[in-house]
Structures are given as C-alpha cells and as structure tokens.
Amino acid sequence: MGISLYVTHPTWGLSEAAEALSLQPFRVWTAGQPRQTPTGRPLPGIYDQSYICLRLQPSSLLDVEHGVHLFLEHLRPARRFLNGLTGSGGNLALNVFISSDERHALELNWQVLQELATFRVSFGVEWVPPVQRVPRTDGDA
C-alpha cells in the first residue's frame, strides 16, 4: 500500500509544495515546460498545468486511515500555503494505492473525512492486482 498527494495548479511552480511539506517529490513538472516521460524522453507538446506527486514511504504505513492521518499531519504546518494554492485554482488529491488480489474494505471515519474537507483535499483509491511473475522458459532460471 502507498499513499500519494497529487498537487496541480494552472500556473504556479510546485517545488515549493514539497519544501512546505518536507517531502521529496516523486514526480514534478511545471506548466509550459515540454512534456517528457518519467525517464526524460521527450514527448510532443507542453504541460498545460503544474503537477507534483509527493509520497509517504510505504514502510511507515500501518493502515489506510493511519496513512491518511500521517499525511494530514504533513499538511497542517503548510495550511496557509495550501489554502492559497487551492484558492487560486490549484487542486489537492490524496490517492491510496493498494495492490492486492484479496478482497478488502476501505473505511475512513467521519473525523478523517472532515479533516480532508477542511484542507480541501479530494480522496481517491487505486486498486490493482499484484504483478504476476511469469516463469522463464529459456532455461536461464
């Protein structure tokens, strides 16, 4: 499981968001820059908005609710910055990534949901099956 905060804004550069939250950016680009793949290969066009993805380390997460709470703790000191960002057209989205082939239930209590709303943070879940390893058949096991 992992939790990421996606921050977008139509014009602001977002490196300051990583500094304000004391988190290393996983992925970042600025509106108007040429598009590229995560490995740096050029793509056609330019980015139409700035974007940054910030992640908590998966080893620090006990469960989804705890992980959301930890992220909210990171947001608290940067509240003024984040309010300015969302008030000027930016968006914040907390995304939980779960890789499992088992059935799970996801429940957040109302206090956590209320706090997400206070910070103007959207909440999403991405559920994907684990990568299935295919045994090699070329004799080089």
Image (spheres, helix red, strand yellow):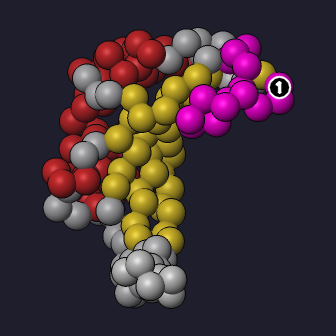
Of residues 111 and 98, the one drawn nearer to the viewer in this rendering: 98
Give the position of the N terminus as an image quadrant: bottom left
Please say if 131 is above or below 69: below
Q: Which residue lies furthest to the right in this view?
A: 44
Please say if 64 is above or below 106: above
Of residues 127 and 93, the one drawn nearer to the viewer in this rendering: 127
Q: Residue 38 in magenta?
A: yes
- Residue 24 in which image quadrant: top left
Give the position of the C terminus as an image quadrant: bottom left
- Residue occupying image coordinates x 29% and y 28%: 23
Please say if 54 is above or below 83: below
Q: Would residue 130 appear left or right of 1 to someone viewing this image?
A: right
Please say if 57 is above or below 52: below
Point out residue 54 in the picture as x, y percentages from the top left corner: 39, 35
- Residue occupying image coordinates x 58% and y 23%: 29
Q: Range of the magenta residues?
A: 31-45
From where the camera sits, is residue 68 visible?
yes
From where the camera sits, is residue 79 visible?
no
The residue under label 1 is: 45
Point out residue 79 in the picture as x, y percentages from the top left corner: 34, 21
Q: Would residue 86 appear left or right of 83 to someone viewing this image?
A: right
